[in-house]
């Protein structure tokens, strides 16, 4: 298998064009998300769409065992909820990285199938990264607004690191 596609472009050039196309297509979406995020920050609430919850695995039925350390902390419930969301988003990102590695190693895929699957994974990763960024920013804002003690801030950082 050579690195040249049927139109004479290298796989790298093709992937670069695809990435540029994704960037252009997502600019409007990013602006819409920024507007929604600004509204959420003003209200002090974070809402994740059903699709975002499905991607993050934080909808109903999500496991609470892995979050027992968060639940057992004496942090405000809003902070606990954001910590759980952040943890779930990080887990989903790890899963997508694993999926990407599998696709890259799968020799049974044609170049077009591989590209399509990579694009799908990249779109999911972009959505998850955006949600994680928003949750991290909201957590920082809430910690400042709630005037958490240094001990509570240290606890938040410890829980985030897990």
Image (spheres, rainbow, N blue to C red):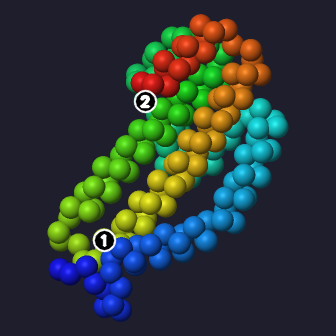
Q: Badge 2: how crowded within 10 Å, few (<14), some, or many (20+)?
A: few
Q: Can residue 6 be seen in this view?
A: yes
Q: Residue at x 64, y 19 (%)?
A: 77
Which quarter of the rendered picture does the N terminus lie within?
Answer: bottom left
Quarter location, residue 143: top right
- Give whichever of 101, 73 is nearer the camera: 101
Pinpoint residue 14: horizontal percent, then vertical percent: 40, 78
Q: Residue at x 31, y 54 (%)?
A: 99
Q: What element carries label 2?
A: loop
Q: Which residue is drawn at 58% across and 49% down?
A: 130
Q: Is mark 1 on a helix, strand or loop?
A: helix
**Mark seen at residue 114:** 1
Q: Which residue is drawn at 51% across and 11% down?
A: 72
Q: Residue furthest bottom?
A: 7
Q: Is residue 60 visible?
A: no
Relative to 146, residue 27 above or below: below
Pinpoint residue 105: horizontal percent, then vertical percent: 21, 61
- Give whichever of 80, 125 is nearer the camera: 125
Q: Badge 1: how crowded within 10 Å, few (<14), some, or many (20+)?
A: some
Q: Are marks 1 and 2 in contact (CB under 8 Å)?
A: no
**Mark seen at residue 63:** 2
């Amino acid at each position: 298998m050579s690195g040249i596609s049927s139109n004479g472009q290298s796989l790298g050039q093709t992937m670069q064009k695809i990435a540029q196309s994704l960037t252009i297509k997502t600019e409007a979406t990013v602006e819409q998300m920024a507007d929604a995020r600004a509204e959420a920050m003003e209200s002090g609430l974070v809402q994740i769409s059903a699709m975002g919850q499905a991607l993050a695995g934080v909808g109903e039925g999500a496991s609470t065992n892995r979050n027992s350390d968060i639940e057992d902390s004496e942090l405000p419930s809003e902070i606990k909820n954001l910590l759980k969301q952040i943890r779930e988003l990080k887990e989903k990102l790890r899963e997508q990285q694993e999926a990407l590695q599998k696709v890259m190693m799968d020799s049974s895929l044609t170049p077009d199938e591989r590209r399509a699957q990579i694009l799908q994974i990249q779109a999911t990763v972009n959505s998850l990264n955006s949600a994680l960024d928003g949750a991290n920013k909201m957590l920082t804002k809430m910690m400042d607004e709630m005037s958490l003690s240094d001990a509570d801030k240290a606890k938040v950082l410890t829980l985030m690191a897990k």
